[in-house]
Amino acid sequence: MFKRLADSSPAIAITVDGKQVTARAGDTVAAALLAAGIDHCRTTPVTGAPRAPYCLMGVCFDCLVTVDGVGSRQGCLIPVREGMKVETQLGRREAGR
Amino acid sequence: MIAAADLASSYELVVIGGGPAGLAAAALAARAGVSTVLFDENPGVGGQIYRAITSTPVKNRAILGEDYWDGAALADEAKASGALIVNGATVWSLDRQRLVGVSIGGKARVIEASRVIIATGSQERPFPIPGWTLPGVMTAGAAQTALKAQGLIVGGRTVLAGGGPLLWLLAAQTLRAGGTIDAILDTTPNRNWLQAIFHLPDFALSPYFGKGLALLREVRAKVPVHRAHTIEAVGTDRLREVVFSGPGGTRRLPVDLLLLHQGVVPNVNLANAAGVAHVWNDRQLCFVPVLDADFGSSVPGIAVAGDGAGIAGGTAAAERGRIAAIAAVRALKPEAVVPDTQAIRQRLQREEMGRAFLDCLNRPADAFRLPEGDTIACRCEEVTARQVRETAQMGCEGPNQMKAFLRCGMGPCQGRLCGLTVTELIAAERKTSPDEVGYYRLRPPVKPITLAELASLPISEAERKAVER
């Protein structure tokens, strides 16, 4: 859905659900997920529907992800850091049962 | 990087939000000798309009346009003023005593303020159409943020839909950056011109007139524009196509990315939670805080500046920030020298001149504000328009009661993406006005914080005794 104008910023390695993803300095978690072509970042608590970042400005909360073990963080407000562990979150607890 | 522990226990002025209003306010107050801290939740200052102004990877100035680069002067001015500017700082609470709850890097503090200027700006108006929760549907503002902050441009088949200046600006910026837009679905009702035309003479004198025309020409030369009365985003796991109806009948476009926009509205959550009185603005179709001529709110010592005070744009926001800051300086340090308010008010008036025209022309159609059937009204709790309408018909009179019935507005976004929709749906069903229906009563924390952060806040002896048995 998105591509980078230029890949000039330094690369930053993060993992998303255990897989290596190369982000760039200046990326937020949500931007890094979009740039990497990840199709969704969470599922909803009510129906388990997939959601991806929607507003990128901190108001919609659709980009909630688990960052370094802390759940429900707003991915669009958190800058990426080398070695950061990002996990998509399953909103509906029953979904995996 | 400033840590929560580095903050003083009190400041004369706390400014919340680092967009044009907050930056201008903090700079003016700090230069007048007022101890000032500015909290901003983003990684860098600029707010949304000047997003990433100090760090954007988009170096070709023509892409974002000169209006964007105006923000650099504001950021420099604030930095040089002596105000303490803290980024990555999320304000989650503000009360009538002007205690400011703020979280920085996972650590919370409560700071006392003699005066507070809320400069939390605006957000994009909810755009509840079928399928708007699907991955692949985003706001135009989101795409613009990704462009400014990360140098990301749209790839794949992209359609923009809606109306308002930002939609056309994003289109122009995307084209200048080498991106492709497959189509624009213009949802502006033709009859809006009937109202807007009365305000055309004023608009013709405003700085936005020439810029707006140039923008429309630039985009229309390269992108097919279709009129749309209804729009549907279609797909199961993600967006696959956009279906729209217009003068030429119903059409389907296969698409990867749909960017929605129908104007911006004040971001009311913090002011509302602080007890600031709000009133319905029928021209802008949103709630705005009740403010005096210096942007002072109904809560003593708390002002609301910038687009949070009602939509007027980035340049006006800076002037409003200055007026609010001058009032704060006068209250705190009557002997301090401040700039001439009259000159600022004149500049503000000029900026606001074309607003009536823009508001009337870009007034979103009912079809895109008052959803029906299974269209989701509350994204977080997945509450449909039908549920809200039926509950209103059953006798539910307001949004707060609606929460109890349906949980709408109770998810993580705290009503930001459904509040206006729910109010307008209730008003429509009960044949009353949105002002009569009112808005959600919001409460802190207005942003999520962890229990550990709350628990680690220092407590006074009196507070401890109050819960001891």
Image (cartoon, helix red, strand yellow):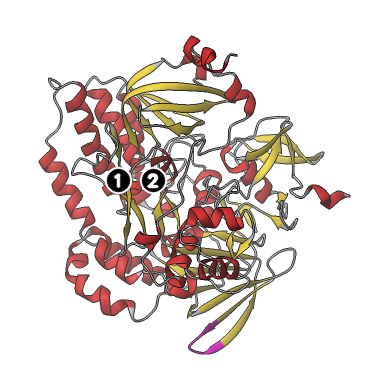
The answer to whether marks 1 and 2 mark residues whose Cβ atoms lie closer than 8 Å is yes
- Residue B3 visible to an observer of this rendering: no
Magenta range is B245-249
* Residue under pointer 1: B317
* Residue type, label 2: Gly
* Residue type, label 1: Ala
Q: Residue furthest front?
A: B469
Counting from the top left corner in percent of width and height, residue B371 is at 53, 71
Observer-nearest residue: A32 or B362?
A: B362
**To which quarter of the image does residue B352 belong?**
bottom left
User: Badge 1 sits on which subunit?
Assistant: B
**To which quarter of the image does residue B137 belong?**
bottom right
Vertical relation: B214 (above or below) B445:
below
**Does residue B394 appear to the left or right of B332 in the view shown?**
right
Q: Residues within 10 Å of mark 2 (few under 14, many from 20)?
A: many
- The number of numbered discs placed on residues in the rendered structure image is 2
Residue pictured at 72% horizontal, 49% vertical: A42
- Residue B204 visible to an observer of this rendering: yes
Counting from the top left corner in percent of width and height, residue B159 is at 56, 69
Residue pictured at 17% horizontal, 27% vertical: B330
Vertical relation: B420 (above or below) B44:
below
Numbered label attached to residue B121: 2
Quarter occupied by the C terminus of chain B: top right
